[in-house]
Amino acid sequence: VAYEVVQDGLLLAQVGGQTTEFAVTGLSPWTEYDFRVTAIDQANNRALVDLQLLQRTADEGLPTWSNGAMTTANVTPSSLTLNWSAAQDDVAVTAYVIAQNGMEIARTDGATLTIDVNGLSPWTDYTYTVTAVDVAGNTSAQPLTVTQKTPDTVKPTFPAGAALSIADLTSTSATVRWPKATDDVAVTRYEVAIDGGPKPAVDGQTTELLLDALRPMRTYLITVRAYDEANNPSLELSTSITTPDGGPPSWAGKKLTATAGITEVQLSWDAAIDDVAVTGYRLYQGQVLIYEGVERQWLVEGLTAENQYTFSVQAQDGAGNWSVDGPTASVTTAKAYDPGFQRLTKAQFLNTITDVYWYLWEDTCRHPNRAQDCGDPNHVFYRGRDKFYQNTLSDIGVHGAATFPSDEAVPPAGAPGRGFSRFDARVYGGNVIAWTKSSLSASQAWRDWVESYYIWHNSNLDG
């Protein structure tokens, strides 16, 4: 006895009568095969009925992607299209399962590699996966994945008729307020701009902002915009404000300096300060306005000698505000003028003696014994006009003075000597000559070269 093993009508093998199994190889997965076994005796008689087995092979291979990818297209705030690469399988991929954020949303056949997804929310992150399924129900070990944020194209909006309001306005600050804006997702911030400059931001729950570091007496344009997370801006709300003046000028030093003469007082004062600008000053003598302008010094004339006067100053700003606490000073004018040198400083005295000495030197050089020497530039007695001042001051002990004082006045044609404004303003030339000659009369040597020495010591005025 023997057995014939047949696969799909084809003889695979004939085995001995003692064998009851046969290993078939080379089959394909997930395929149906028709197996038959026929018994044969020694006379080659065949059994009337064959043994038959219909068997499908198993499919143990999983679908895979050798270089797959999942992508998105046509993304809108509420929809998108998913595309993916075809998977490979040892038999066939029969389906694809698509999940959104871990939940299955679609299943396609093995030939479909794209679907449209609708009903999405704007500015939202979505994660999609696609898993391949083969004919045996095996699924791919690793799905393809893609993450997509939907766009947000809707701008925040303010309520109809919305407007900015201003509160707590001062010269340097103000509070701006606005109504809440709405958005299809959420308002995340408001940006406030001053004259188009840097835009400080507040969160989407805040509807007011303190604006500080403003300047007095200035007009500002204030704007506010709402923004969502996608940075979409709303339409702009705007308003203008004008800060008030911060008040009248004030005084830091509060010093009014008064220098009295006989019939006049020279006044000068520290500058006032203001949050905008000081535009002018008023000077009062008692309660009487005597000066108004931008200068910070003034000479008051026509006063009475030996009389007390009180002066005060007030400052004005650009808004027309006047201070009320400006500096004051009281001063008493000097005694009536007494011609002579008693009021001159040492420097003024030296200038005066130099001027007078020119007269004396010219008079000396007229003497017959001196005329020739005085005219010789090489002689020690020579006093050319250009050198006279330096040489004369050296004679009386003021060494190193190489130039005339800045208030030197050139004498008119035909007039001897030089004049000095401070000297001319205090004493009359005739009085000076009379006083000097009388002070030198005891020496009777003023025509000599050493007469400057006697001028210095006889005067007994050393400053």
Image: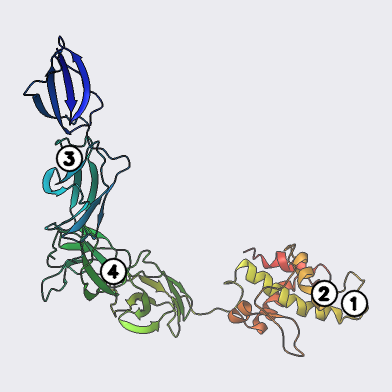
Q: CA distance from mark 2 to mark 4?
A: 84 Å
Q: Quadrant of residue 28?
A: top left
* Residue type marked 1: Arg
Q: Residue lying furthest top in this view? A: 18
Q: Secondary structure at mark 2?
A: loop
Front of the two marks 4 and 3: 3
Q: Secondary structure at mark 4?
A: strand
Q: Quadrant of residue 35?
A: top left
Crowd rating for badge 1 (residues with CA inside 10 Å; few <14, some 14–19, many 20+): some
1 and 4 marks in contact (CB < 8 Å)? no
Residue at x 67% of width, y 79% of height: 432
Q: Is residue 93 left or right of residue 419?
A: left
Q: Nearer the viewer, residue 103 or 358?
A: 103
Q: Is residue 163 left or right of residue 417?
A: left
Classify the position of the C terminus by image quarter.
bottom right
Indicate the position of residue 312 as horizontal and vertical percent values: 34, 75
Front of the two marks 3 and 1: 3
Q: CA distance from mark 3 to mark 2?
A: 139 Å
Indicate the position of residue 411 as horizontal and vertical percent values: 72, 85
Q: Secondary structure at mark 3?
A: strand
Indicate the position of residue 416 as horizontal and vertical percent values: 76, 84
Residue 194 is labelled as 4
* Residue type marked 4: Ile
Q: Nearer the viewer, residue 267 or 357?
A: 267
Q: Which residue is mark 1?
A: 370
